[in-house]
Image (cartoon, helix red, strand yellow):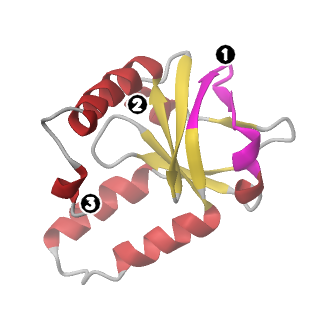
Amino acid sequence: MFLGEYYRTKDNKGRVFVPSNFREELRGGIVLSKGFDEKCLFLFSREGWQALQGRIMSVPIAKKNLQVFSRWFFSSAREAEVDPQGRIKIPQELSDHAGLDKDIVLIGVSDRIELWAKEKWEEYYSKADTSFTGESGTFEELGF
């Protein structure tokens, strides 16, 4: 399980250090892909990727939206490894998609890690924080 928020810097070779508490679960390899709704990246353990792939592929293939989504999502995915120093190399096309220049935030979201440009994450988190701590939003609205 992935939890927490970690600020990192991408080096000039496109590598970023993975938090040490995430590395054990990522030993079997990783898969990076575009995120679903925000300009971020998803990072899955190989096992987590296989579970997600199974859920997506269990939907009938005749659904047109599934075909469009599958092509978009799976074509962006790249396999990678954590190197001996604990870094991953972010492919340039994925880095460009998410606007990952120098300062990056890795956040644990239970079954995956998300990689965000620092400015985008802070803006997103600020809005979310206001929604869930102010009068405008409650956990009850989410069904809790």
Q: Looking at the image, can residue 81 be seen?
A: no
Q: Residue at x 40, y 31 (%)?
A: 98
Task: Check disc 3 and give the amino acid type.
Answer: Phe
Mark 1, secondary structure of its residue: loop
Q: Residue at x 79, y 38 (%)?
A: 86
Q: Earlier in the sequence, mark 2 or mark 3?
A: 3
Task: Check disc 1 and give the amino acid type.
Answer: Asn
Task: Check disc 2 and give the amino acid type.
Answer: Ala
User: In x, y percent, where is residue 13?
Assistant: 68, 22
Q: Residue furthest front?
A: 135
Image quadrant containing the C terminus:
bottom left
Q: Earlier in the sequence, mark 3 or mark 1?
A: 1
Q: Which residue is mark 3?
A: 69
Marks 3 and 1 sit apart, C-alpha to C-alpha, by: 32 Å
Badge 1 crowding class, 10 Å Cα cut-off, few under 14, some 14 to 19, many 20 or more, is few
Position of 88 compared to 135: left or right?
right
> Which range of residues does the magenta coloring cover?
5-23
Q: Which residue is mark 2?
A: 98
